[in-house]
Image (cartoon, rainbow, N blue to C red):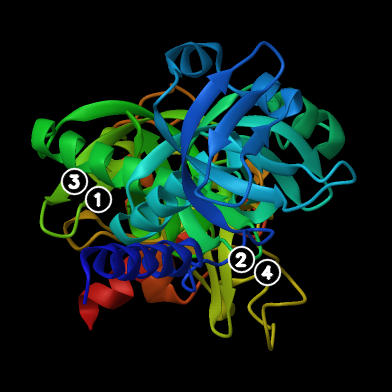
């Protein structure tokens, strides 16, 4: 083969290689919704030209530039690599329209998925609302907080007004759902608040000590007790620690929003639980009950509970005892429910008092009016302490004992029907002879 033939053959091979290389069979045209890496070729005031390694360059329109942060837009330069979203592979002018903003959202979606896995809290800004909840913006993504996951709304005003007040506010939230295909990004302020409260409670538990007295606000009332917020964390006052007397439901003595002083009863740092008490800050009515009360004394109280065999009655200081069914009214009642109800105010007398056992019994069979009291002696002397009714402990005790043994009505009996002194002495002589 001559030298000319060899040169021609080499030129043909090179042409074939060049022709084959011009057909890139791996090339795929841009598709709507696709995200590709692009290189900035030119930056103009109203558009940016990018190279997507496609048949034609892409155009970032002015609308997309306006959505960019000023700081980010200023950082862009020719030759920089940016992700772009294919908005329209071929518009009416045969242009390839792309978006840098929507391309950057890819990273935000990836970050959102990471946050869903890590459960870290982030801040979002409320941009609007609808009937289902609040519309928010996080980085370059639009998100949503369902009403059931909002805790910052003011429940004391109209819902529309409350949602309007949220616009522009920054809220701490957690990601609870991510669906990029449906462009669905759901946040929860409630879940973020749970984590914040848990951290706050752990910090509070480290600072508190059993026996501390702190101020708090009642945040919830349940059958089993009352929740009180103390410094950002909730503690529980069990229903048995609300008062010295029986409490049927916490709402009987507390209301939500009330500020109260509480005693730190127990701290469980493993479970992050705080047990509080209200009654420990109130004086125990049994401490001096033997000095303030005596058998036969006329007192006033209110019914705390009604049961088949009678009613529990609490005095104003919290001392609580039983008014048995047989001691109600004239003692002939068959059931208590038609006679007394919870919350009723009653006048009654103390039938027996046992401070050492923390027991007190009441009766109405001995009279329940001041006129039923034994009249004071002419000279006004008394052998023992006198209560507010003018009755001495010694006189009342003697009267109760004589009544019990002689089968007569106790100190509440009408003076006109009470046995005369001679009859009482005769009864005493008879007991002595026996």
- The residue identified by callout 3 is 265
Q: Image check: 414 left or right of 215?
A: right
Q: Locate the N terminus and report the quarter of the image it occupies.
A: bottom left
| Marking on residue 329 | 4
Task: Name the foreground residue: 287 vs 215.
Answer: 215
- The residue identified by callout 1 is 275
Please tell me in which quadrant of the rendered image residue 65 appears: top right
Image coordinates of residue 60 in percent, x first then y, are 66, 32
Task: Name the foreground residue: 255 vs 330.
Answer: 255
CA–CA distance in space, label 2 to label 3: 53 Å
Q: Locate the C terminus and report the quarter of the image it occupies.
A: bottom left
Q: Is residue 366 visible?
A: no
| Marking on residue 231 | none
Please tell me in which quadrant of the rendered image residue 130 appears: top right
Q: Residues within 10 Å of mark 1 (few under 14, many from 20)?
A: many
Please tell me in which quadrant of the rendered image residue 332 appears: bottom right
Badge 2 element: loop
Q: Is mark 4 in CB contact (under 8 Å) with mark 1?
A: no
Q: Residue furthest bottom?
A: 334
Q: Nearer the viewer, mark 2 or mark 3?
A: 2
- The residue identified by callout 2 is 181
Q: Residues within 10 Å of mark 4 (few under 14, many from 20)?
A: some
- Which residue: 34% across, 55% down? 114
């Amino acid at each position: 083969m001559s030298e000319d033939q060899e040169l021609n053959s080499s030129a043909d091979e090179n042409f074939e290689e060049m022709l084959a290389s011009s057909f890139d069979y791996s090339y795929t045209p841009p598709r709507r919704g696709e995200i590709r890496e692009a290189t900035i070729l030119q930056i103009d005031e109203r558009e940016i030209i990018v190279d997507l390694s496609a048949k034609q360059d892409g155009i970032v329109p002015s609308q997309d530039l306006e959505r960019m942060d000023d700081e980010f837009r200023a950082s862009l330069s020719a030759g920089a690599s940016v992700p772009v979203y294919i908005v329209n592979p071929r518009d009416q002018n045969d242009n390839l329209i792309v978006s840098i903003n929507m391309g950057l959202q890819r990273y935000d979606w990836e970050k959102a998925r990471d946050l869903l896995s890590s459960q870290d809290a982030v801040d979002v800004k409320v941009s609007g609302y609808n009937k289902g909840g609040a519309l928010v913006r996080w980085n370059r993504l639009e998100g949503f907080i369902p009403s059931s996951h909002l805790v910052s709304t003011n429940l004391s005003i109209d819902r529309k007004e409350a949602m309007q007040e949220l616009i522009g506010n920054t809220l701490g939230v957690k990601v609870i759902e991510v669906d990029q295909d449906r462009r669905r990004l759901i946040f929860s302020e409630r879940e973020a608040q749970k984590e914040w409260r848990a951290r706050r409670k752990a910090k509070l538990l480290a600072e508190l000590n059993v026996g501390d007295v702190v101020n708090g606000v009642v945040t919830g009332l349940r059958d089993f007790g009352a929740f009180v917020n103390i410094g950002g964390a909730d503690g529980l006052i069990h229903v048995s620690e609300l008062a010295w007397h029986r409490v049927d439901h916490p709402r009987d003595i507390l209301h939500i929003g009330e500020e109260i002083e509480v005693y730190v009863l127990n701290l469980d740092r493993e479970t992050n639980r705080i047990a509080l008490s209200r009654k420990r800050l109130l004086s125990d009515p049994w401490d001096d009950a033997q000095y303030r009360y005596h058998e036969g004394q006329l007192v006033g109280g209110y019914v705390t509970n009604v049961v088949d065999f009678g009613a529990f009655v609490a005095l104003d200081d919290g001392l609580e005892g039983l008014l048995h069914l047989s001691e109600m009214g004239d003692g002939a009642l068959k059931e208590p429910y038609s006679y007394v109800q919870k919350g009723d105010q009653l006048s009654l007398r103390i039938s027996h008092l046992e401070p050492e056992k923390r027991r007190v019994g009441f009766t109405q069979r001995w009279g329940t009016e001041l006129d039923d009291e034994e009249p004071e002696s002419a000279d006004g002397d008394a052998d023992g302490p006198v209560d507010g009714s003018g009755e001495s402990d010694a006189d009342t005790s003697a009267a109760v004992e004589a009544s019990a043994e002689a089968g007569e009505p106790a100190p509440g009996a009408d003076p006109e029907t009470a046995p005369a002194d001679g009859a009482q002495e005769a009864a005493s002589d008879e007991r002595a002879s026996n």
